Image (cartoon, rainbow, N blue to C red):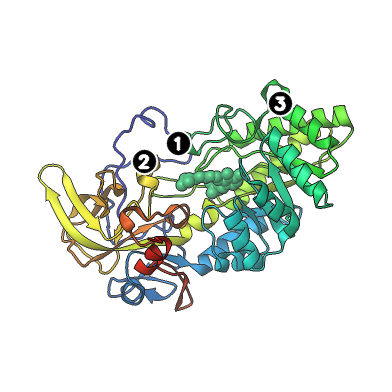
Amino acid sequence: MSRSAHPAGPRHADVLPEGRSAASTAPADDLNALDPKVWAHTVARDADGVVTVGGLPVTELAEEYGTPAYVLDEADFRDRARAWRTAFGADADVFYAGKAFLSRAVVRWLDEEGLNLDVCSGGELATALAAGMSAERIAFHGNNKSPEEIERAVRAGVGRIVLDSFQEIVRVAHIAQTLGKRQRVQIRITVGVEAHTHEFIATAHEDQKFGIPLAGGQAAEAVRRALQLDGLEVIGIHSHIGSQIFDMSGFEVAAHRVVGLLKDIRDEHGVELPEIDLGGGLGIAYTSDDDPREPHEIAKALTEIVTRECEAARLATPRISVEPGRAIVGPTAFTLYEVGTVKPLDGLRTYVSVDGGMSDNIRTALYDAEYSVALVSRASDAEPMLVRVVGKHCESGDIVVKDAFLPGDLAPGDLIAVPATGAYCRSMASNYNHALRPPVVSVRDGEARVIVRRETEEDLLRLDVG
Ligand code: LLP
């Protein structure tokens, strides 16, 4: 597998965030090797050099389902979901963050593996309910839930609504009361932690749209108001510090501050809130340079932090919940593309154009995200060449993989795959240039099935009512 090159970028020039080993600008020794860190568990190269997943050659998948396609390893998804569930045990809850990728099949897998679900829109809620997830196991998030969404969630009986503003406290209380219900809620606070991640995916510093700041007593005031409202049952405090985080110290500070608030609440109101949610955000390996932690290490670290902080504050340890999205689904899928054109630019690099692009993976353009890539329809011993994998959209920023090495004999018609695209790729896909969003094909034990079908031109035209 090729190793992404990481030219010194301005953000990471002097400090290497934890979880990231020294960047490599050289090709991996063997471009045919597939680093298990970035590929789904069942991915392997067969004797003919063709990459297989769930026992199926990618060449067959491409023929049957076309390209581009997201190929998802169901066994791997279940393994990772189970690993999180097991790591946290019966005294904690794992809510899969549906925004990373949600479909009815995924909801059923989560249900079977004993995970709960975090949704953040009416559409995600509808998908979860349509797949038969029990509403009690659903948490409803969002910084601007509409009154209709709130009403639907309350009527459905969701296990918790995570309140994000003073106005929402009143809104949810009013709706619940009108429906004759008492809604279980958590209050999302911002603890003032700067997560070492891209600005747009860091969420616990104060100058941003999510949550109620702890600073200046605002979070305490939110709790004060919520506790007075009959329509609400306040069950806990929520904090989500950001995404693609490797460094546990941010969680440590967050837990310390959340527990501090629980203590203040106990002192002021005489109530010990029974739950604390530390959100999601755990990083995954997009390239061989990333070193993510295992769920059991994360569970141990978070549980220890919360227990220690609660002991110090003489509080009973609350029930912990977490909301991993990317860490479960991210590594389980890759995007399969067909190479269309190969354009060497003398002294620079070779541009490899594929049949998708920023419409199926916006993360590179949006966050400067790094990905790996490999030739998967055959093995090759050709010399490595430095490539940029680009899409077919009318935009020069339409980059899928910024810097990587692929075999020098790469040619039109070859299949290449970009691993670790399970999270925030299909879910953030667009129809830019009227691209048809790719299908999600899940594979397991030698069988493939489409869990989200490819869009068609009829789909596009159906929305265009003339
Ligand atoms: N909980 C809350 C309240 C969240 O806002 C999020 C992500 C998660 C859990 C799950 O975070 P995860 O474990 O998946 O990192 N589009 C960006 C990521 C945005 C994340 C938004 N919230 C990306 O592609 O990196």
- x then y, percent, for residue 291: 46, 46
Is residue 243 found left or right of 114 in the rendered image? left
- x then y, percent, for residue 125: 63, 57
Residue toward you, 12 or 261:
261
Asked if residue 376 shows in the view, the reply is yes
Amino acid type at image mark 3: Gln
Disc 2 or 1, which lies upstream in sequence?
1
- x then y, percent, for residue 111: 65, 66
Question: Residue 39's image quarter?
Answer: bottom left
SS type, badge 2:
loop
Give me the C-alpha separation between circle 2 and circle 1: 9 Å
User: Are circles 2 and 3 on residues that touch, CB within 8 Å?
Assistant: no
Amino acid type at image mark 1: His
Q: Which residue is pictured at 17% across the width and 46% down the height?
A: 349
**Residue marked by disc 2:** 368
- Say few, some or many: other residues with alpha carbon within 10 Å of mark 3 (under 14 / 14 to 19 / 20 or more): some
SS type, badge 3:
helix
SS type, badge 1:
loop
The residue positioned farthest toward the top in the image shown: 216
The residue positioned farthest toward the right in the image shown: 270
User: Are circles 2 and 1 on residues that touch, CB within 8 Å?
Assistant: yes
**Cβ of disc 2 within 8 Å of ligand 1?**
no
- Say few, some or many: other residues with alpha carbon within 10 Å of mark 1 (under 14 / 14 to 19 / 20 or more): some
**Cβ of disc 1 within 8 Å of ligand 1?**
yes
**Residue marked by disc 1:** 198
- x then y, percent, for residue 73: 47, 67
- Say few, some or many: other residues with alpha carbon within 10 Å of mark 2 (under 14 / 14 to 19 / 20 or more): some
